[in-house]
Image (spheres, rainbow, N blue to C red):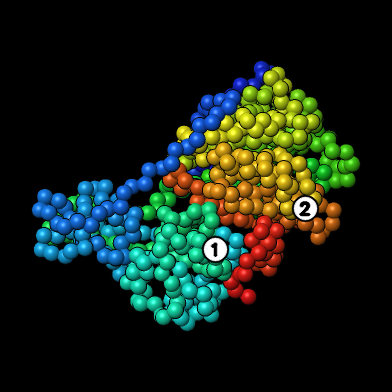
């Protein structure tokens, strides 16, 4: 989807604006290369829906049979992963454990790094339970752990894996030293790891799910956009050999970069007061300078901009006392420079300067091809779910403002839309049943604490129960806790992205999350938590290792995950 740094070419769903709205922003030259643009899909609105998604069909496990002359049989080594066996079975082959002269096809792990014509390439992931603070492992520590000589962060903790994974890496690295790993049935790996924290495991890429945290190895991760397989140690090849010529199309892979999509969700943006004053002094693009490249890399970057752009906005006052906010129209360049794709309009301050400012803001978004949801030109426009397709992944965004005094959209007036849970859960359930992966965000009540209130928990969980895979609070000035609920990830509040609301230089309101969600081949793999610290009342920077480790420990404990951690 990404990304021109100044002007982004995308399709907007919302194309009906009042006649006479002025389009203010001129076209600007591109400074960054473009990425594939997603397909935007017109939504079908339902007042209420109880449709639920059907369970996906699970391919049957191939049956080992006695060879027959009319059936192409394959002998497979124990290292061959179950999914690869299924893919070969779908080509009309059957598997046997009997090696005889009647067998013409053989497949097993290939110990070399070369990608042969009839070999399948399999990517594995190094994982730990989600509430693990450790992020990165050196390849040398992983390999030395295999040989019981490691002093790395997981020293003395056996690697968990299933039998086929053990056979694979035994062929690649040699037999492991005694006690360095433990074989666990694939369907018990996750529960075993969570019950034994700290724990780590090696799993095939196709078995990644939200309750796992994917650890990087020397900075490389198969769920990240910049992944380089050539420098990653957890790649295996399974070679097909044939007595005669091998048939075509028997080479497979379990990771296709073209099926991967990343979506970044952010917290509060309000380019006002001291934030705006800093921009006037340091430059409009100053707030995004440090996090810009990370935001640009995502396929979809979400910004919750709570404030309208308005040509008559007064100069910023860093000590402004009232809470009536607007931003200069030219500040849109900051959102374009960080690669914003989707704007959430559910914020409290969208209507602060009345309809004229809202119409002008919507015109600016339209001219710059920025899609929006959670608010709009009227109630119907704002309630529309935003539908798009990115690398084959069908995504849905829906949002609202729970505080009716700020939700000004009506049948005839612009503004943020009020929360209607019957309507929203119906929309989520319907689109989930149609193969979409719903993302639900809220402008909720703000709290000065990390934990969520009982009502907040009920409201957020309702969206997950309807089928949302991600439920995220956009409102919080204080970062809030998170949970893994059923198959969904719920984050009750991310904190500030670009906003000056903190009282002193050590305020918790300076800390925040940027959540990078990963989707693959129509499924949700999970989230990577990016942690930030706000400086100069305007610009977030990445936390250093000590800050991040303590921040994650605190928030995992607040979230109910007070587990022992690997490392010092």
The mark closer to the camera, 2 or 1, is: 1
Residue at image x 67%, y 40%? 459
The quarter of the rendered structure image containing the C terminus is bottom right
Q: Quadrant of residue 164?
A: bottom left
Above/below status of 400 relative to 56: above
Give the numbered dot on residue 449: 2
Number of numbered discs: 2
Between the residue at mark 2 and the residue at mark 1, the CA separation in whole angstroms equals 27 Å
Image-based side of 442 in relation to 296, left or right = right
- Secondary structure type for disc 1: helix
Give percent across and percent down for residue 295: 60, 49
Give percent across and percent down for residue 499: 76, 47
Give percent across and percent down for residue 21: 69, 22
- Secondary structure type for disc 2: loop
Image-based side of 327 in relation to 27, left or right = right
Residue at image x 63%, y 30%? 422
Q: Quadrant of residue 556?
A: bottom right
Q: Quadrant of residue 409?
A: top right
Looking at the image, tell me whether mark 2 or mark 1 is earlier in sequence order.
1
Image-based side of 3 in relation to 474, left or right = left
- Decide: few, some or many residues near mark 2? Use Cα within 10 Å; few <14, some 14-19, many ≥20: some
- Decide: few, some or many residues near mark 1? Use Cα within 10 Å; few <14, some 14-19, many ≥20: some
Above/below status of 71 relative to 234: above
Are discs 2 and 1 less than 8 Å apart at CB?
no
Give the numbered dot on residue 194: 1
Residue at image x 84%, y 56%? 504
Question: Is residue 375 visible in the rendered structure shown here?
Answer: no
């Amino acid at each position: 989807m990404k990304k021109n740094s100044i002007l982004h070419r995308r399709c907007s769903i919302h194309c009906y604006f009042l006649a006479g709205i002025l389009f203010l922003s001129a076209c600007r030259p591109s400074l960054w290369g473009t990425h594939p643009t997603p397909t935007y899909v017109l939504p079908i609105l339902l007042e209420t829906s109880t449709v639920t998604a059907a369970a996906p069909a699970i391919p049957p496990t191939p049956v080992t049979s006695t060879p027959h002359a009319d059936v192409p049989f394959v002998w497979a080594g124990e290292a061959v992963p179950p999914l690869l066996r299924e893919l070969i079975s779908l080509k009309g082959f059957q598997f046997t454990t009997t090696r005889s002269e009647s067998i013409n096809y053989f497949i097993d792990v290939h110990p070399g790094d070369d990608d042969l014509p009839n070999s399948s390439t399999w990517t594995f992931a190094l994982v730990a339970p989600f509430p693990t603070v450790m992020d990165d492992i050196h390849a040398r520590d992983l390999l030395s752990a295999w040989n019981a000589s490691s002093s790395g962060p997981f020293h003395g903790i056996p690697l968990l894996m299933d039998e086929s994974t053990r056979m694979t890496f035994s062929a690649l690295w040699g037999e492991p030293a005694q006690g360095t790993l433990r074989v666990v049935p694939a369907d018990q790996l996750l529960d075993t790891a969570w019950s034994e924290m700290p724990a780590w495991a090696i799993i095939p890429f196709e078995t990644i799910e939200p309750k796992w945290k994917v650890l990087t190895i020397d900075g490389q991760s198969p769920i990240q956009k910049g992944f380089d397989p050539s420098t990653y140690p957890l790649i295996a090849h399974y070679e097909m050999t044939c007595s005669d010529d091998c048939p075509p199309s028997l080479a497979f892979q379990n990771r296709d970069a073209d099926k991967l999509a990343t979506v970044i969700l952010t917290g509060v943006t309000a380019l006002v007061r001291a934030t705006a004053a800093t921009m006037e002094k340091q430059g409009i693009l100053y707030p995004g300078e440090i996090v810009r490249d990370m935001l640009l890399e995502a396929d979809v970057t979400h910004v919750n901009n709570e404030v309208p752009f308005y040509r008559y906005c007064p100069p910023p006052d860093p000590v402004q006392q009232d809470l009536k906010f607007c931003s200069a129209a030219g500040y849109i360049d900051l959102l374009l420079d960080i690669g914003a794709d989707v704007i959430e309009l559910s914020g409290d301050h969208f209507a602060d300067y009345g309809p004229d400012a809202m119409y002008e803001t919507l015109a600016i978004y339209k001219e710059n091809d920025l899609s929006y949801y959670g608010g709009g030109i009227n109630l119907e426009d704002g309630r529309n779910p935003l539908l798009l397709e990115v690398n084959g992944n069908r995504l849905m965004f829906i949002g609202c403002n729970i505080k009716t005094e700020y939700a000004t959209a009506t049948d005839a007036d612009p503004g943020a839309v009020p929360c209607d849970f019957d309507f929203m859960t119906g929309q989520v359930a319907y689109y989930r049943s149609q193969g979409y992966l719903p993302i639900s965000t809220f402008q909720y009540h703000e709290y000065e604490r990390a934990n969520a209130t009982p009502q907040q928990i009920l409201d957020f969980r309702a969206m997950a129960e309807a089928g949302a895979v991600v439920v995220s609070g956009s409102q919080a000035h204080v970062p809030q806790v998170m949970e893994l609920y059923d198959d969904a990830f719920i984050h009750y509040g991310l904190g500030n992205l670009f906003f000056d609301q903190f009282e002193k230089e050590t305020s918790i309101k300076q800390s925040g999350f940027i959540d990078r969600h990963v989707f693959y081949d129509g499924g949700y793999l999970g989230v990577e938590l990016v942690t930030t610290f706000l400086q100069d009342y305007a610009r977030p920077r990445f936390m250093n290792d000590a800050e991040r480790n303590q921040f994650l420990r605190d928030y995992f404990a607040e979230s109910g995950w007070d587990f022992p951690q690997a490392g010092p």
